[in-house]
Image (cartoon, coloured by chain):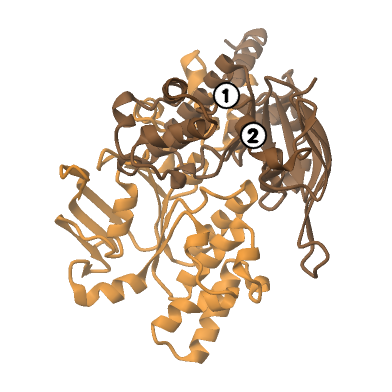
Amino acid sequence: MSFISAENIKYSYESEEHNKKTVLNGVNLKIEKGEFVALLGHNGCGKSTMAKHLNAMVLPEEGVIYVDRMDTRDEELTYEIRRNVGLVFQNPDNQLVASIVEEDVAFGPENLGIEPDEIRKRVDNAMKAVGIYDLRHSAPHKLSGGQKQRVAIAGILAMEPSCIVLDEPTAMLDPKGRDEVLSSIQELNKKGITILLITHYMDEAVLADRVVVMDKGSILTEGTPQEVFSQVALLKKHGLDVPQATELAYKLMGAGVKVDKMPLNEAQCVDLLLEVLK
Amino acid sequence: MSILEVKNLTYTYSAGSPFEKTAVKDISLSVEKGEIIGIIGHTGSGKSTFVRMLNGLTKPTSGQVLIEGNDIWEKPKEIRKIRFKVGMVFQYPEYQLFEETVYKDISFGPANMGKTQEEIDKAVKMAAKFTGVSNELLDKSPFDLSGGEKRRAAIAGVIAMDPDVVIFDEPTAGLDPLGRELLLSQIVQYHKERNNTILLVSHSMEDIASIADRIIVLNHSELVMFDTPKVVFSKVEQLEEMGLRVPQITKIMLALKEKGYDISDGILTVEQAFYELVDLLKKEGKL
């Protein structure tokens, strides 16, 4: 069985006027251990609701989710599931609780009732893993957005989860902050942590092993970044974007230029253009 | 005469204490009526403090802010009037909705300006039109709206005051690609019809590249560039050193140029790049 296995998940919210609004309409999603998956879709497509299902913050109305073979509906397993799957949200300011960076990172493991020596070790390791060790005695509110977001990630890491779900972690960051957070995510993935990254930035999604696109509560398409972003027309039709490099190649194809393989980033696009111009 | 001018504008936090920090340092520049100005800079570069001084929310430690040639702090008691002239749309403005209905929320600004009921109604309708807030939404509670609708309603609340200068602080943060595009085109449309002046703070270089006439670049509290997107985004290394980037498309075209191909400077959008390449391919007989 896959590390995360969601089968036919249905979920709806009760709105003010008491009519039900379906958010997830039979989602099937499998994520293997150690995979880096990007989840795309426009606002309101159900991405965040899906993310909250992965650590039992929200339970499915219909269908079932297994996290490392644990059924999220089983209350006795909730604690273990949440230790295993950590969530990082968009706004770093809403996720920091302590007045010193290292205390903030220690908050999670302290709540797990771990021995102080072990906490010290985990906190140090977590801070080093995301490159904020030098900031350990700083006050979180004095950090930049990218640094704060990495403190939030370190706080999750210190609980030694096997999977981290990040819901638009870079939406509020400047370009440098985005780069810092993304390279941290890639580093952690190299160390074997399973990553689910929800994002509106296509240049982030191309870094993943696999891209899953959601639309209106179901999965529209999925595959490698190459497979997904080659479907420019489908993505555009559903209000989604492709990287600028891909869009340029797509337009050139329309004008009669031969493109064998869609470029996903700057370097690939430059190579393609040099080839065409040769 | 320029609509907005700042002279030696400086702001220092906690002056005289050990925590003293200069957030904005000696900035002088002027903006002409009808321009769209982009403002970029890393987190903590002073962007927010800078724009807060432009509508009198923060009082400069030294230096001046002139609107149509008048110092906004000349009569401190009338600073509120400046805020009707220079409207500010904050980051995540949807969290600032508070009224019972969307209509009331949008009318809050014009009502505070002392307008008549008829004028208020006109202002609300005008603002709703520009931001795509439909009539049926006007009677709803703002809290029943979707995220995107809330943001547009909040922006309508500022536009309803019909300010001469509108400052948008990260208006597209958190929106999906379609939402970004829609909001940006609404801002451009609004700007075209009212011929007012727009200042846009953003971390999205693509957004700025696509709509700004000129760009203010702040770095460590100082003004380092104030020029057209073409010029600003040609300084790739300098921007990257400041923690900023140039749009992907600009970089791709610069790389081709460096390889010796005849490419114009400062390609900022995919559209421009496409036409440039089609011309080039035709010239080279490849198309």
- Relative image position of residue A113 (x, y in whole percent): 39, 87
Relative height, residue B20 to residue A133 (above, below): above
Would you say residue B165 is visible in this rendering? Answer: yes
| Residue at 40% over, 71% down | A161
User: What color was chain B assigned in the picture?
Assistant: brown
Q: Is residue A82 left or right of residue B282?
A: left
How many neighbours does mark 1 have within 10 angstroms: few (below 14), some (14-19), or many (20 or more)? many
- Can you tell which of label 1 and label 2 is closer to the viewer? 2
Q: Earlier in the sequence, mark 1 or mark 2?
A: 2
Residue B2 in the image: above or below residue A191: above
- For chain A, the rendered hue is orange
Using the image as rendered, state which of residue A269 and residue A239 is in the foreground.
A239
Q: Position of residue A214 (x, y in %)?
A: 31, 41
* Rendering quarter of residue B149: top left
| The N terminus of chain B sits in image quarter | top right
User: Which part of the image, by quadrant, shows the C terminus of chain B?
Assistant: top right
Other-residue count near label 2 (Cα within 10 Å), few / some / many at <14 / 14–19 / ≥20: few
Residue A2's mark?
A: none
- Asked if residue A242 shows in the view, the reply is no
Mark 2 residue element:
helix
- Asked if residue B96 is positioned above or below residue B30 in the image, the reply reads below
Where does the image place residue B124, in percent across and percent down from the top left? Answer: 43, 25
Q: What's the mark number on residue B270?
A: 1
Residue type highlighted by circle 2? Lys
Q: Chain of mark 1?
A: B
How far apart are the alpha carbons under marks 1 and 2? 42 Å
Q: Nearer the viewer, residue B270 or A74?
A: A74
Q: Is residue B142 left or right of residue B243?
A: left
Disc 2 marks which residue? B81
| Quadrant of the image occupied by residue B206 | top right
